[in-house]
Image: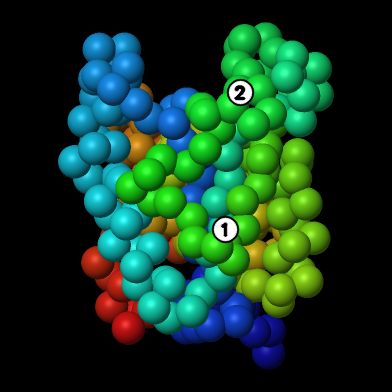
């Protein structure tokens, strides 16, 4: 009899990491109020507070905390992916825009990986680091639901990780785009609310 693995496993220290994608000064600031009003409102009122709650619960449970930020290895961004170059998207090495926002500031021994592509599996040592630590499950949060979050979840699933999307701890340009993204990549992960994940962690 064939045994089909389940996507859902107990969340516990040693096998689970919380990933916070691109919640940094260059993607979230007061400039977004006029430029991207829905995104700014969703991020301010829902996404960032929910990431903060989940971060607190994961730290308390001693889970691995990993941040990724968009940041080039060079000042002129010549090392960026072709897509980032075409999009004219560059946060130079060491700039303020590449730093995690103060509300979710990393603690001393937490991991920060700089990336130059949508999925950090493609432009960082993320996969290597996870395997060294023994991580099997990744709770994904951050920006944008239908871009970097989507790509990371699909790549992680293909590499054999159990991917979990904290649906109300992600944000994008519109409610429709957010909802469509969850429906599109739902087959690659377990989708849950922050409240539900915190209950499981506790």
> Where does residue 166 sit, x and y in percent of width and height?
38, 56
For the C terminus, the image quarter is bottom left
- Crowd rating for badge 2 (residues with CA inside 10 Å; few <14, some 14–19, many 20+): many
Can residue 10 be seen in the rendering of this structure?
A: yes
In the depicted view, which residue is nearer to us: 4 or 116?
A: 116
The residue that disc 1 covers is 66
Residue at 51 percent of width and 75 percent of height? 63
The residue that disc 2 covers is 91
Res 14 quadrant in image: bottom right
- Of labels 1 and 2, earlier in sequence is 1
Q: Is residue 102 above or below residue 139?
A: above
Can residue 184 be seen in the rendering of this structure?
A: no
**Which label sits on residue 54?**
none
> Where does residue 168 sit, x and y in percent of width and height?
29, 50
> Where does residue 124 sit, x and y in percent of width and height?
75, 45
Secondary structure of the residue carrying tag 1 is strand
Residue at 38 percent of width and 63 percent of height? 55
Q: Would you say the residues marked 1 and 2 are in contact, meaning their CB atoms lie under 8 Å apart?
A: no
For the N terminus, the image quarter is bottom right
Q: How is the image coloured?
A: rainbow
> Where does residue 113 sit, x and y in percent of width and height?
66, 47
Specify whether 12 is left or right of 129.
left
- Crowd rating for badge 1 (residues with CA inside 10 Å; few <14, some 14–19, many 20+): many
Specify whether 2 is left or right of 38.
right
Specify whether 159 is left or right of 175.
right
Residue at 60 percent of width and 33 percent of height? 70
Q: CA distance from mark 1 to mark 2?
A: 19 Å
Residue at 62 percent of width and 58 percent of height? 111
């Amino acid at each position: 009899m064939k045994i089909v693995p389940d996507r859902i496993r107990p969340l516990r220290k040693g096998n689970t990491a919380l990933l916070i994608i691109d919640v940094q000064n260059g993607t979230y600031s007061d400039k977004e109020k006029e430029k991207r009003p829905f995104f700014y409102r969703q991020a301010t009122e829902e996404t960032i507070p929910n990431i903060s709650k989940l971060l607190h619960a994961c730290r308390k449970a001693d889970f691995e905390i990993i941040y990724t930020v968009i940041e080039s290895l060079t000042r002129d961004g010549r090392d960026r992916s072709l897509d980032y170059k075409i999009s004219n998207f560059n946060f130079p090495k060491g700039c303020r825009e590449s730093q995690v926002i103060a509300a979710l500031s990393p603690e001393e021994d937490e991991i920060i990986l700089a990336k130059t592509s949508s999925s950090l599996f493609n432009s960082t040592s993320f996969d290597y680091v996870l395997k060294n630590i023994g991580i099997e499950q990744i709770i994904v949060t951050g920006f944008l639901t239908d871009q970097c979050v989507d790509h990371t979840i699909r790549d992680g699933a293909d590499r054999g990780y159990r991917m979990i999307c904290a649906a109300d701890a992600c944000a994008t340009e519109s409610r429709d785009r957010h909802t469509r993204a969850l429906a599109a990549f739902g087959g690659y992960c377990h989708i849950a609310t922050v409240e539900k994940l915190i209950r499981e962690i506790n």
